[in-house]
Image: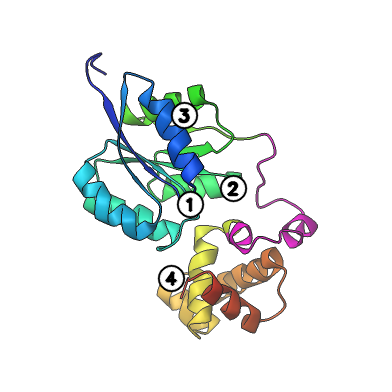
Amino acid sequence: MNKHQQIKVFIADDHPIVLQGVSCVLSNRPEFQVVGTAASGDELSKKMLLAKPNVLLLDLNMPGNDFYENINWVKANAPWVKIIAYTSYHSADLVRSLIHGGVAGYLPKTATPAEISDAITCVFSGEIHVTMVAHAKTDATPVTEHASLTDDFRKRLGLSRREQEILVLISRGLSSQRIGQTLYISKHTVETHRKNILRKLDFNSSTELVKFAVQQRLV
């Protein structure tokens, strides 16, 4: 990076203390310029294009659009922007899903100012940057731990992106065979995913899955 070039950063988070704190940290570094903030998905889509940032720090759990919708919107409308997921949710499987979905970096909200700065600089240079935490969970986490999660959004993040796709189609009333045809996978694979979704969410029926999907604004 040219020593005179500033990295323009946009911060999207619905917690004022995070917006103010991270903005303050970055503003004290000459290589960064905070060009805008947003507290919801709607505000992000209205303000970010005008701000023209290089890097977006994106909270996953904000009012408005689903976080994958926010990511896809940025990719479609501002493909030059490098996205860093900045979140309090820790899961190795979530990180893999985000990177596969086009995110350039992952930062837990326990990250230090130095880690935030390093992540922004890294993704701006075209690299993938992931800062993990020691207790990040994977799909191998015992069922009892998944069942103990009381935060529905956290439960949802325990699902892979494919599982979320199948959950949406289940909620729309599609059979396993029809879901398989839609996603180009076998009926057996769909049913295996369905069992895993029920296990991870600690549900026993499709009715509970539909209710959960509606609450999470997936349908």
Q: Residue at x 55, y 58 (%)?
A: 160
Q: Does residue 77 appear left or right of residue 34 in this picture?
A: left
Q: Are marks 2 and 3 in contact (CB under 8 Å)?
A: no
Q: Nearer the viewer, residue 207 or 15?
A: 15
Q: Are marks 2 and 1 in contact (CB under 8 Å)?
A: yes
Q: CA distance from mark 1 to mark 3?
A: 16 Å
For the residues carrying marks 2 and 4, which lies nearer the camera in this image? 2
Nearest to N terminus: mark 1 or mark 3: 1
What residue sits 42% from the left and 57% below the top?
68
89 to 104, vertically: above or below: below
Residue 132: give x, y in percent of width and height: 58, 35
**Real-space Cα distance between discs 2 and 3?**
16 Å
Percent coordinates x, y for residue 86 in the rendering: 48, 42
Q: Which mark is residue 89?
A: 2
Which residue matches tag 1?
60
The segment highlighted magenta reads 134-156
Which comes sooner in the sequence, label 3 or label 4? 3
Magenta highlight on residue 185? no
Circles 3, 4 touching at the beta carbon (< 8 Å): no
Upstream in sequence: badge 2 or badge 3:
2
Indicate the position of residue 126 as horizontal and vertical percent values.
32, 30
Q: Is residue 153 magenta?
A: yes
Query: Which residue is the site of mark 3?
Result: 116
Q: Marks 4 and 1: which is nearer the front? A: 1
